Amino acid sequence: MAVEVGTGSKLLAGRTALVAGGGSGIGRAVVERFAREGAAVEFLSVDAAGVRATGEALAAQGCSGRGEVVDASDAGSVERYYAGLRTRHDRLDALVNCVGIQRYGTVETTSVETWDEVLAVNLRSMFLMAKHAVPLMRVAGGGAIVHVSSCQALASQANVVAYTASKGAVVALTRAMAVDHAAEQIRVNVVLPGSIDTPMLRASAREIDAEDPGAVVATWGRGHPIGRVGTPEEVAATCLFLASPLSSFVTGAELRVDGGLLASVALAAPREGRVAAEAASREREV
Ligand SMILES: NC(=O)c1ccc[n+]([C@@H]2O[C@H](COP(=O)([O-])OP(=O)(O)OC[C@H]3O[C@@H](n4cnc5c(N)ncnc54)[C@H](O)[C@@H]3O)[C@@H](O)[C@H]2O)c1
């Protein structure tokens, strides 16, 4: 079925969207963008201050949305949350799951408790949030689920085994869900951000240099071919594309939002000027 999207129209007008992890960083940017695009936005996060701050950010833009404090990794809490959601909405058109935590360690230094914590927050939350979203999307005649994974699903830093394993699993989960629900017009896609300037990134930078985290972030930025780290709004724009009718034939896709990070190989090659100079020198010798 072809979908017409009028120019200038709000992309999510008349739709209901739920953002998990909407209390900070990328999730907050998604909440704000979706609200500006006309969606009735619901969001949840585990931290009360974050939920409050996102609500205030919405109000400052003249938008509205409803936030709630929920641990998305806990099956009972998610079930209770959806029971409440169903009293407010009889359908759900979009779910974006931005929940995530970062913990450092190798397979030797990561404790079993940390492994379980990271897998529960980064992976089980995706499963739980989607499990209850699918029936509500079926009622709506279709919907879009967007998972936020990471570049680290495909290439890993050192010392991040639990995080990397969880992010890789989210990509596999996305593929499996996309196949299962495509015929019901429920599209499932995953976004793979590079370094994005959020509280999570700043916390990691502080672990490297507590005095000057900004310098660490700038160094990471230079590691991305585009020359900087990304913004939460840039990831939110990609989530909007995947949640909107603009991507009506896209499902099971892995979309990198990484300033070229995964396209690059960190090995020096001869520069164009040097190649030309060497060719000229060879011609002179002939
Ligand atoms: N910032 C980056 O550079 C980057 C890069 C790649 C991927 N990501 C991913 O993007 C997503 C968002 O990250 P961010 O950088 O915006 O981080 P962030 O810390 O700013 O936001 C994460 C949000 O998840 C919420 N959260 C954590 N545990 C939760 C739980 N159990 N239940 C409900 N909410 C919970 C937090 O309260 C917060 O609102 C994460 O999945 C992260 O792994 C971030």
Image (cartoon, rainbow, N blue to C red):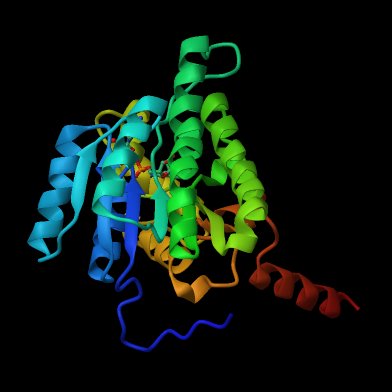
Q: How many marks?
A: 0
Residue 71 position in % (x across, y down): 32, 30
Please state, as top left, top right, bottom left or bottom right, where the N terminus lies in the image: bottom right
Residue lying at 25% horizontally and 48% vertically, measured from the top left = 87
Query: Taking the image as drawn, is residue 264 in sight?
Result: no
Q: On screen, 214 above or below 13?
A: above
Nearest the eye: 189 or 224: 189
Residue 190 position in % (x across, y down): 54, 53
Nearest the eye: 26 or 41: 41
User: Residue 156: which quarter of the image?
Assistant: top right
Q: Is residue 72 left or right of residue 199?
A: right
Residue lying at 33% horizontally and 29% vertically, measured from the top left = 77
Nearest the eye: 193 or 12: 12
Residue 121 position in % (x across, y down): 43, 29
Residue lying at 19% horizontally and 50% vertically, measured from the top left = 66
Q: Is residue 266 left or right of residue 58?
A: right
Quadrant of ligand 1: it is top left
Please state, as top left, top right, bottom left or bottom right, where the C terminus lies in the image: bottom right
Residue lying at 45% horizontally and 68% vertically, measured from the top left = 241
Query: Taking the image as drawn, is residue 120 in sight?
Result: yes
Residue 51 position in % (x across, y down): 19, 41
